[in-house]
Amino acid sequence: ASLAAARYGKDNVRVYKVHRDEKTQTQTVTEMTVCCLLEGDIETSYTEADNKPVVATDTVKNTIYILAKQNPVDPPELYGAILAAHFPTKYSHIHAAHVNIIVHRWTRINIDGKPHPHSFLRDGDETRNVEVTFRRNEGFTITSKIGGLLVLKSTGSAFHGFHRDEYTTLKETWDRILSTEVDAQWTWKRYQSIAQVKADATTFDKTFEAARNTTLKIFAEDNSASVQATMYKMCEKILAEAPGVEAVEYALPNKHYFEIDLSWHKGLKNTGKDAEVYAPQSGPNGLIKCRVVRK
Ligand SMILES: O=c1[nH]c(=O)c2nn[nH]c2[nH]1
């Protein structure tokens, strides 16, 4: 047997950082969960129980905290790049690092119409995520993500004209509920240095907001012929808005809501145009994926 691939490190490292602005007496918070895995000349720690090359996962955890203290944690793309580059820079036998960051929502609370200086609420399980791989002599591959954004539209979605044969029972519909959980990501052109990543810091934030707004706008306004058709429009718009992005990917579950025929009860009409009460399904669910690149 031989070792085909190996990477190790610390996962589920929860980090909270506060920024205190003395001038405005306003505080800003960031909470994230970090995974950092290392690759390099570590084979003998697997094949020969040789621990000399092992930078302990506890050391990786400590480094996550120290670099969060010494550097900005926003945008997560920049902190992720700083963290990923640290290990191959410090340890010559580590050649690459893979960083995944999940940024949780702490939205500033408005009290009496005014943003509160140090109070926040968790408005949803939606997260902003980042994946950074740094490989020595190859630079940074950065992917930015929206995760867990639950959206539903009660009409404005259809699905008809699909292939029919002896296996098909699905009825065509011109008016259905569309409910999904947005898993969207966009991969940036390769960066060669932290300086280049830092120079784009505001672009990462602006592109995240633009991609989220584009997703919501097209989801709401597109008279959807299918999940496929609607998600493609989202990808096209994000590519058009973000010249630094090379590819956009979406994975959208189609979370079905079934009509309930209640006609057995005194002829109660609750199907087709009379449908009002539905049964939301936990599964099975459709899953529609795509990756869109520039021509
Ligand atoms: O939007 C949809 N795409 C599909 O591929 C599909 N299949 N069943 N329902 C569906 N809805």
Image: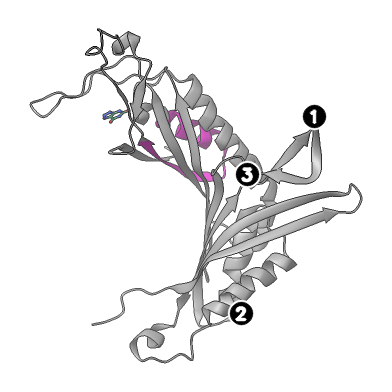
What residue is shown with label 3? 122
Mark 1 within 8 Å of ligand 1, using the beta carbon = no
Q: Nearer the viewer, mark 1 or mark 2?
A: 1
The structure residue drawn at horizontal position 46% and vertical position 78%, both measured from the top left corner, is: 40
Q: Amino acid at mark 2?
A: Lys
Categorize mark 1 by other alpha carbons within 10 Å: few (<14), some (14-19), many (20+): few
Whichever of callouts 2 and 3 sits on the residue coming sooner in the sequence is 2
The figure's colour scheme reads: one colour
For residue 1, which quarter of the picture?
Answer: bottom left
Categorize mark 2 by other alpha carbons within 10 Å: few (<14), some (14-19), many (20+): few
What residue is shown with label 2? 90
Q: Nearer the viewer, mark 2 or mark 3?
A: 3
Percent of width and height locating residue 191: 57, 57
The residue at the far left in this view is: 166
Whichever of callouts 1 and 2 sits on the residue coming sooner in the sequence is 2
For residue 19, which quarter of the picture?
Answer: bottom right
Look at the picture and state if 116 lies above or below 199: above
Percent of width and height locating residue 86: 61, 72
The magenta span reads: 231-253
Tell which quarter ligand 1 is in.
Answer: top left
Res 193 seen here? no
Q: Secondary structure at mark 2?
A: helix
Look at the picture and state if 263 lies above or below 230: above
Marks 3/1 in contact by CB < 8 Å: the verdict is no
The structure residue drawn at horizontal position 33% and vertical position 87%, both measured from the top left corner, is: 47
* 240 horizontally vs 70: left or right: left
Mark 2 within 8 Å of ligand 1, using the beta carbon = no
Does the magenta-highlighted stretch encompass residue 103?
no
Whichever of callouts 3 and 1 sits on the residue coming sooner in the sequence is 1
- Residue 113 is tagged as 1
The structure residue drawn at horizontal position 66% and vertical position 46%, both measured from the top left corner, is: 106
